[in-house]
Amino acid sequence: MPNKPYITKDPAPLTVSEPAVAYESASAETSSSDRWNPNVPFHGTQEEWWDHFHQIEQGSFYPVSEVHQRILQWIDTQEK
């Protein structure tokens, strides 16, 4: 087969809404452990991950029975 050159379009310019740009601007302002964005990869040490998990655990948690009760109440209001 002869070598055929591939014609590729120019890549689209990056916009602010793209994660790569948001990640670069966020990392310049604060460390990755201070601001968490689910669309941006989080790179950190094991200690940073454990700190992150412990901060989540400090939040309020509801027992499963209470959550089920709230869901059933919400379903009842949606049916009305």
Image (cartoon, rainbow, N blue to C red):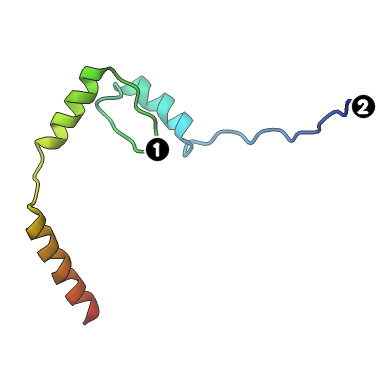
Image quarter hosting the C terminus? bottom left
Q: Is mark 1 on a helix, strand or loop?
A: loop
* Residue at the image position 47 percent from the left and 30 percent from the top: 21
* Viewer-proximal residue among 40 and 47: 47
Quarter where residue 60 is shown: top left
Q: Tell me residue 39's x, y (percent).
A: 39, 38
Examine the rendered structure and indicate whether residue 26 appears above or below residue 12.
Answer: above
Pointer 2 residue: 2
Quarter where residue 48 is shown: top left
Q: Tell me residue 75's x, y (percent).
A: 20, 72
Pointer 1 residue: 39
Distance between mark 1 and mark 2 Cα atoms: 43 Å
Q: Tell me residue 73's x, y (percent).
A: 13, 71
Q: What label sits on residue 1 in the rendered view?
A: none
* Viewer-proximal residue among 42 and 35: 42
Image quarter hosting the N terminus? top right
Q: Tell me residue 52's x, y (percent).
A: 20, 28
Q: Which amino acid does label 2 sit on?
A: Pro
Q: Give the number of callouts.
A: 2
Q: Which amino acid does label 1 sit on?
A: Asn
Tell which circle, 1 or 2, labels the residue nearer the N-terminal end. Answer: 2
